[in-house]
Amino acid sequence: MMVDMDVLADVVSAMKTGPATSGRTDVRGPWGLRFRHSFGATFHLVLQGTAWLLPPDGDPIPLGPGDAVLLPRGLQHTLADHPESPTVDFDPSVEEPPHGQGARTLLLCGTYRLDRERPHPVLSRLPDVVVVPADPGRHRTLHTAISILGEELDAQRPGAAAVVPALVDALLVLILRAWFENNDCPTDRGWARALTDPAVVQSLELIHEKPGAAWTVADLAAGVGLSRAAFARRFTEAVGEPPLTYLSRWRMTTAARLLRDHDRPLATVAKEIGYTSEFAFAKAFKRDFGVPPGTYRKQLAMA
């Protein structure tokens, strides 16, 4: 059975609740910028120069040109030219940073607006700080995108207002893909394995392609050419939960996206994700989200 579904892209698309916000941050040493806790995923790109990341816990991390940082839970942290430099609270989308007359560093800092109430395991199981260092021999697409962003932001050429948001939007997938491909991301467990194990990723593609289908473990196992027991064990070890538990999770994630992005009747949404009645769908949705689907949609419209 062949499907045309990119699981990672589909997960990121489902988790986004709005466009990313970002700002060009041009500083000269000494400088220190403290980023408050965010309700999205915070990211930083070092476009020129160097910096130090002072995470919420742990030792300072040196950063250089082309390095990318993602804080999936948006925890408070600091960027500085030196770990001991004085710091100030900073929001890159609304203010210019204070700085000195020393060495220059050009950053792109921002936040991805993501559903934090019910994060997908791809994001929730990441560490608090994800660093993808510049490596000329790896992750060429990511580092090409970072290089282009640096040129666009530094030169301020015509059309940059269209180019920059599109590249920033793509960066989340590029950073996650690079992290999962890195040697320091274990591939024997977790989503690094889920996205590289052919049988697991094919079963995820089946679920994502048709979340409303009446899947059974036997159906999914047959679809990827494994016995029921072998498939269930392999899927659970990689994804972190059994196949039908993940199916239920993805159905609710899909329902939330449909309620957020479309005005389809609730009965139609219920049918699309595999519920035979609007009542059964509403009950399951309220169990996961705390409110009925109609209320959820109204709350989004008022936000």
Image (cartoon, rainbow, N blue to C red):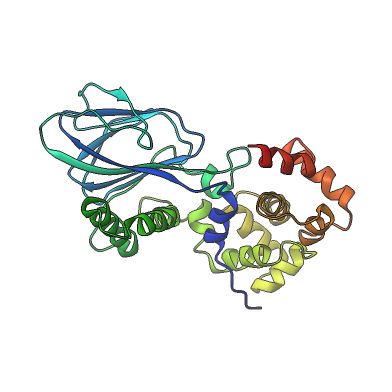
Asked whether residue 43 appears in the rendered view, the answer is no
- The correct choice, above or below, for 85 with respect to 38 in the image is above
Residue extending farthest to the left is: 102
In the image, 172: left or right of 199? left
In the image, 69: left or right of 273? left
Q: Total number of numbered labels?
A: 0
Split into 4 quadrants, where in the image is the N terminus?
A: bottom right
> Residue 152 appears in which quarter of the rendering?
bottom left
The percent coordinates of residue 79 (x first, y second) are: 28, 33
Split into 4 quadrants, where in the image is the C terminus?
A: top right
- The correct choice, above or below, for 232 with respect to 31 in the image is below
Residue at the location (25% across, 53% down)?
156
In the image, 136: left or right of 36? left
The percent coordinates of residue 157 (x first, y second) are: 25, 58
Residue extending farthest to the front is: 158
Q: Which of 299 and 289 is in front in this view?
A: 299
- The correct choice, above or below, for 147 with respect to 55 in the image is below
Residue at the location (65% across, 49% down)?
241
Q: Nearer the viewer, residue 223 or 225?
A: 223
